[in-house]
C-alpha cells in the first residue's frame, strides 16, 4: 500500500513538473519597417474561416503577426454578421516575413494585408483559388468607377476595416477615395484611406506597430482631416502612374535581427 502511494505521488509530481515546464507561447514580433523588415514567431491565417477565404495560397503569403490575424478574423466575422458574402483575403506575409521576390515591396513585418473588393458568394474552387479572377472597380483608360462595382457593401467593408484603432492606414485607389469622399466625407475613418497607385480591385490594410515589438519602425502619422481636399485633387488631376523603375529584384537592407 505504501509503495503504491509513493508511486502515485511520484507520478503526480512528474506530471505537475512537466506541466509547469511547458513553455509559454513564443512572443511574436514585427521587426524593422514595413518595406525592410521581418516577422518573428508569426502565425498562419487559417485558409478558410467564418466570413473569409484565403486566395493564392500556393504563394505561402498567409502569415502575419497575431494582431493581424485577429484583426482579419474579427473583420470577417463582422462582415458576415452584416450579411455580406465571404471576403477574399490575398497576400499577408511569408512565414518569417522579409521581402517577396515578386509583387509587393512592403508586407514584410506581418502587419499588411490585401483584401479584395470582390466577395465570395460560394466556396472558391481549387483551380480558381490559385488564379482567381480579378474584379476591377475602375475602368483604367477612363480612370472612372465602373457602374455598379462600388456599392453599399464595398463602402461598408471599408468602414468596418478602417474604423478599428489598430489600423494605421489603408491604401486605396485615388478614384475610390474620391467616391468615399462623396458618400461619407464626415465619417472619422475616411482620413485613414490613403490614395495610392494601382489598387483597382483590392485595398491594402496596414496595422500600427503592436505592443511587444520594440524594433518595429512605425510609418509617419497620416495628416489630420479626411484627406478629401487638395491632397486628393493632386492625385486626380492627372492619372497617376507607377514610377519607372527596373523590374529586377533588389533585396532591401534589412535590420540586423532580420539577417541584414
Image: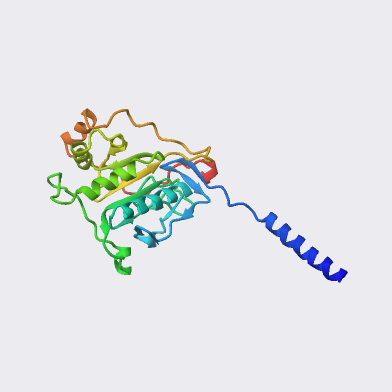
The scheme the figure's colours follow is: rainbow
- Residue extending farthest right: 2
What's the residue at 64%, 53% (across, down)?
23
On-image quarter of the N terminus: bottom right
Q: Horizontally, is 26 left or right of 52 in the view?
A: right
Q: Horizontally, is 68 left or right of 130 in the view?
A: right
- Residue extending farthest front: 1
Give how far across and how far down residue 232 sits, in percent: 22, 33
Q: Nearer the viewer, residue 182 or 41?
A: 182
Q: Is residue 63 above or below residue 130?
A: above
Q: Is residue 25 above or below residue 188?
A: below
Q: Quadrant of residue 237?
A: top left
Give how far across and how far down residue 96 sits, in percent: 49, 52
What's the residue at 37%, 41% (across, down)?
164
Q: Is residue 37 visible?
A: yes
Q: How many marks?
A: 0
Q: Is residue 200 visible?
A: no
Q: Horizontally, is 245 left or right of 60 in the view?
A: left
Give how far across and how far down residue 19 sits, in percent: 68, 58
Amino acid at each position: 500500500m505504501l509503495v503504491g502511494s509513493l508511486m502515485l505521488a511520484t507520478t503526480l509530481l512528474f506530471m505537475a513538473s512537466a506541466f509547469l515546464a511547458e513553455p509559454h507561447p513564443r512572443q511574436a514580433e514585427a521587426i524593422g519597417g514595413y518595406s525592410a523588415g521581418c516577422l518573428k514567431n508569426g502565425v498562419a491565417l487559417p485558409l478558410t474561416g467564418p466570413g473569409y477565404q484565403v486566395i493564392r495560397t500556393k504563394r505561402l503569403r498567409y502569415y502575419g503577426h497575431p494582431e493581424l490575424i485577429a484583426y482579419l478574423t474579427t473583420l470577417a466575422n463582422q462582415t458576415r454578421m452584416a450579411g455580406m458574402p465571404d471576403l477574399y483575403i490575398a497576400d499577408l506575409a511569408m512565414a518569417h516575413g522579409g521581402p517577396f521576390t515578386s509583387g509587393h515591396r512592403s508586407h514584410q513585418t506581418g502587419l499588411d494585408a490585401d483584401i479584395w473588393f470582390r466577395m465570395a458568394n460560394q466556396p472558391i474552387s481549387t483551380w480558381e483559388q490559385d488564379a482567381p479572377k480579378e474584379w476591377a472597380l475602375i475602368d483604367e483608360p477612363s480612370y472612372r468607377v465602373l457602374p455598379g462595382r462600388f456599392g453599399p457593401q464595398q463602402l461598408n467593408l471599408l468602414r468596418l476595416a478602417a474604423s478599428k484603432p489598430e489600423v494605421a492606414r489603408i491604401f486605396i485607389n485615388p478614384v475610390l477615395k474620391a467616391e468615399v469622399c462623396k458618400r461619407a466625407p464626415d465619417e472619422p475613418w475616411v482620413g485613414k484611406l490613403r490614395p495610392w497607385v494601382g489598387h483597382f480591385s483590392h485595398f491594402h490594410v496596414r496595422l500600427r506597430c503592436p505592443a511587444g515589438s520594440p524594433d518595429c519602425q512605425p510609418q509617419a502619422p497620416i495628416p489630420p482631416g479626411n484627406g478629401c481636399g487638395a491632397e486628393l485633387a493632386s492625385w486626380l488631376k492627372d492619372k497617376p502612374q507607377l514610377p519607372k523603375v527596373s523590374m529586377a529584384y533588389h533585396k532591401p537592407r534589412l535590420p540586423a535581427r532580420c539577417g541584414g
